[in-house]
Amino acid sequence: MQVLGGAWRLLRAVLHVLHGMAVMTRFPRLSAAERHQRIQWWSAGLLRAIGLHLQVTGVAPRASATLVVANHISWLDIAAIHAAAPQVRFVSKADVLQWPLLGWLIRGAGTLFIERERKRDAVRVVHAMAEALSAGDAVAVFPEGTTGAGPEPLPFHANLLQAAIASGAPVQPMVLRFSDAAGPFSPSVEFLGETTLLQSVWRVATARGLTVHVELLPPVSTAHADRRALAEHLRQLIAERLAQAA
């Protein structure tokens, strides 16, 4: 039964992704509010299709200059954040463009891509982020730079935070956590090591009782901030909330 249930969820998720691709072709003709509404609908729908319940606490940033900083656990993180805050633009590793179907959708949602193996590319992305923030956009980053197991965030890289400092935008920490019937941190969503995207998708589809918790903490000012100290402060805020959940 678990295999059949997983296959059914996977089929629903694929059909939902294909529907999203059809919706994306109309994006150039939509207003910003209409695009945000469809991004939120599609993201929440993907979570439901693959078998996740969504729980959101806290106040999401409005469509204004805010840098959202979140811990990184899974390929589902982007959908979870967009279900709570559809107006944010992501900064993501360029290799997600190679993901079947999802890569095309992630690009269409206005994502900024960074090639982490090229050190100079971070400078380009920081400038692009600062321009987006100065224009009033909300931007989201995963400062760990890779996915972790969940209970404790990895060290935060400070480079991308310079965009918020340079533009004077506040930083809003966001805490992501996936739980299941067995405990507050589900191993089913871990996307670590040599795990492929397809392997991870199947683990999620066959899991039971998954809930993604999205908690938005109060914004933090960047006035006169040192980016390394700011990065550690943000990490501590998120780590404390995860520890409380444990």
Image (cartoon, rainbow, N blue to C red):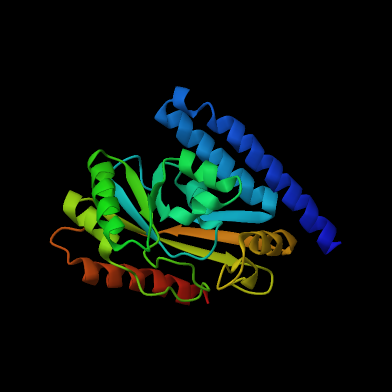
Nearest to the observer: residue 224 or residue 160: 160
Q: Residue at x 39, y 45 (%)?
A: 89
Q: Residue at x 50, y 75 (%)?
A: 151
Q: Residue at x 23, y 50 (%)?
A: 169
Nearest to the observer: residue 60 or residue 134: 134
Nearest to the observer: residue 148 or residue 194: 194
x, y percentage for residue 193?
A: 55, 73
Nearest to the observer: residue 156 or residue 169: 156
Which quarter of the image is occupied by the N terminus?
bottom right
Describe residue 147's horizontal placement relative to residue 188 as left or right: left
Q: Residue at x 66, y 41 (%)?
A: 16
Direction left: furthest residue: 224
Describe residue 172's horizontal placement relative to residue 34 as left or right: left
How many badges with numbers are in the image?
A: 0
Describe residue 229's horizontal placement relative to residue 173 as left or right: left
Direction top: furthest residue: 29
Q: Is residue 204 visible?
A: yes
x, y percentage for residue 206?
A: 74, 62
Look at the picture and state if 8 lies above or below 190: above
Describe residue 1's horizontal placement relative to residue 167 as left or right: right
x, y percentage for residue 18?
A: 65, 38
x, y percentage for residue 52?
A: 65, 56
Look at the picture and state if 170 lies above or below 35: below
Q: Is residue 57 visible?
A: no
